[in-house]
Amino acid sequence: MSDQAHMRAEHDLAPGEEEQHSVGTRILGYVVGLVLALLLTATSFFIAGTDLVWQPSIPVALIVLAIAQMGVHLVFFLHITTGPDNTNNVLALAFGLLVVFLVVGGTVWIMAHLNANMPAMDQIMPMRR
Amino acid sequence: MLGKLDWSAIPFDQPIPLIAGGVVLVGILAVLAWVVVKGHLPYLWHEWITSVDHKRIGVMYILLASVMLLRGGSDAIMMRIQQAVAYQSQGYLPPEHYNQIFSAHGTIMIFFVAMPFVIGLMNLIVPLQLGVRDVAFPTLNSVGFWLTATGALLVNLSLVIGEFARTGWLAFPPLSELSYSPGVGVDYYAWSLQISGVGTLVAGINLVTTVLKLRTKGMNYLRMPMFCWTTLASNLLIVAAFPILTATLAMLLLDRYLGFHFFTNEAGGNVMMFMNLIWAWGHPEVYILVLPAFGIFSEVVSTFSGKALFGYRSMVLATMAICVISFMVWLHHFFTMGAGPDVNAIFGIASMIIAIPTGVKIYNWLFTMYGGRIRFETPMLWSIGFMVTFIIGGLTGVLVAVPPADFILHNSMFLVAHFHNVIIGGVLFGAFAGFEYWFPKAFGFRLNDRWGKLAFWFTFLGFYVTFIPLYVAGMLGMTRRMQHYDVAAWRPWMLVAAVGMAVLTIGVICQIVQIVVSIRNREALRDRTGDPWDGRSLEWATSSPPPVFNFAFNPDVRGEDAYWDMKAHAKQQSLDHDTPEYQDIEMPRNSPTGFVCAFFATVMGFALIWHIWWMVILGGIGAFATFVVFAWRDHDEYVIPADEVAAIDRVNLEERRNLVSMAGTV
């Protein structure tokens, strides 16, 4: 089925199928990714325990660092790029993010309302006393 | 040694499941004996069980779905008879048995009839429509099928060994927790869905990859037949939604097996979280089932109207809109749980919005028919029947999407009538339309059209006689899942529904007769050209049944309705007679991986249900070892020499030229 492999448009590649760079370039890419990932992890642990920053900003900082971590993984390890050969992967990522956002966000919203309107028995009882 | 399993697991005191199970067992043994004695076993093993050919796997999926349809249908008949007789009496089914029947009916009809039926049709047809030789991962495809079959086997095993869940088809806690369901019923339910869920997920990944990555020359996205688009949307939903089901059931299983408290009443568990999660999967699931059916109707309506599909691009847009919006409506399944007006209003509006793309589709089909030269063949009858029925079901759906109305109708027979109206009228009619339409492609002969039309009319009328009374009963306040009742006003409607069930049963019998009669007359019904319906897409460009490699040459697609275009082109050029140069074709080798893996999965599932821990380990190691052996295989393809390709292809080419030249003279 070699002709089929050939038929695949250049604009439609799977991760890892992109044109082959030399081994050195690829190793460099992975090393940069690893260093960035370690740096972000270390920063997260540092921020969580430190009192150098304004305390209420810590959760926000952790979220930002976590999202940056995901970005590093996507770019350096999963090879998601903005190039035209990556349209499918970017669209799949966008669809995945949308579904996660809808399901997680929706769940948090729904459950907050349900818990407020329908508290568990042991929470109702003390209120009545 | 054997965990919870002992002789008390077999229900000697209940004649109905025991006799039914016994008859089925004797039937299976008889078929097996016949296969072995006649010497068909090697054929069955080499050509079907280990096959990685997408067409064979598709046929096996549909066979599984058809057999399970009979099982689920028997449950339905028993329930309708029970409700017809159980007025101020206990009826003939004791409550614990009746509860198992309605749970099994729902589980089987959704997971082991509707799902395998649509996945089977997608498997069979999508690679052909895309003009390619197989799906992206052929062996994985076989694994997916056999894991689905494992789930079906476990559900049916519960009939004679142990019991099935008494909780309804979604096993809501706290009823499904260990304290209220201490038996093995819920475990049968959960493990069979976990195993078949893996199968569904790999089928979904496989088909998404196939549509995105394997298309023939010139088949860009906006030239794909509509069925390929709906397949893409439906399988994207499978990939996105089925992990939610797996995770939810895994949490329920942790509660039951390891004493966790995700969904228990005590120790901080939250029952409402289960409803939320299961419906976050459950609503996309509805569209996973119905989108492929929409695709089938698009193909059928356009073929039998002799016109290109009206508004192709709006249809694509509507399909993808449904794909996204289906993730925004799940709360409408539990409006009454107390989320309050803000949440209910938003989800109610979203549920009404999703009716818009669906309405776009209905109009597209109507306008495709408008001005067309319509042939009322059996697949077209199912499609028209669908349009009428589905609109009624859709309208009652919009009605229950209004939260205040839902507070009155929630969990009533009105709801039961509504979702049967959309699932039978949408998915099942679509499956039957696809079955009639593509049967000649799969087997090389058409189905008898008199019995097919009879089957349609009995099913169509039977559906209305059965389910319209359930709407009425729901309006009169009857709730679902009642083992007996004392309200005189409901009784006549239950009797009418039972009559409707009898008519539906005649419809099913007509389908069986149709298949038997057609097999007997197969020579007269033979489809020699591979294009029995004057079709428009590429699956009709090859012979019926297609050779193992589907196409001797990868078709060159120049526009929508690829094959229609080719036929018109050939007529104008008065047929090019130059002999093409054939080449060797590489095809994937057959592999028993799927079957062996499913065997070990069955052992493991059964052992998990009965707490036989050594057997769990054995099954787990076996399944893993199968994968390792497959991963270390040396060669996975074989070559079909060019001569053989030429010999197979020439026969079909000759027939086809005759057809086109005859059509030219008419």
Image: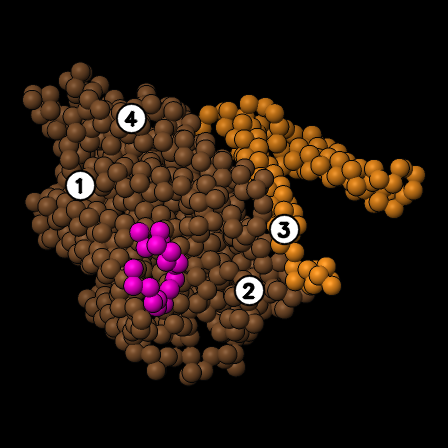
Q: Which chain is brown?
A: B
Please tell me whether mark 2 sits on a helix, a strand or a loop.
loop
Residue drawn 47% across the image and 79% down it: B5
Please tell me whether mark 3 sits on a helix, a strand or a loop.
helix
Q: Amino acid at mark 4?
A: Leu
Residue drawn 73% across the image and 32% down it: A28
Q: Which mark is residue B378?
A: 1
Please say if A110 is above or below B584. below
Q: Residue furthest right?
A: A52
Q: CA distance from mark 3 to mark 1?
A: 52 Å
Q: Nearer the viewer, mark 4 or mark 3?
A: 3
Q: Is residue B264 at least partly visible in the picture? A: yes
Q: Nearer the viewer, mark 3 or mark 2?
A: 3
**Residue B63 locus on image (x, y percent):** 28, 54
Left or right, B29 with respect to B506, comes to: right
Residues under numbered marks 1 and 4 in contact, where contact means CB atoms less than 8 Å apart: no
Write down the chain letter for disc 3: A
Q: Which mark is residue B309?
A: 4
Q: CA distance from mark 2 to mark 4?
A: 49 Å
The residue range painted magenta reads B472-489
Neighbour tally class for label 3: few under 14, some 14-19, many 20 plus, Cα within 10 Å: few
Picture quadrant of residue A84: top right
- The earlier-in-sequence mark between 1 and 4 is 4
Please say which color scheme the image uses: by chain
**Residue B498 locus on image (x, y percent):** 23, 60
Neighbour tally class for label 2: few under 14, some 14-19, many 20 plus, Cα within 10 Å: many
Write down the chain letter for disc 2: B
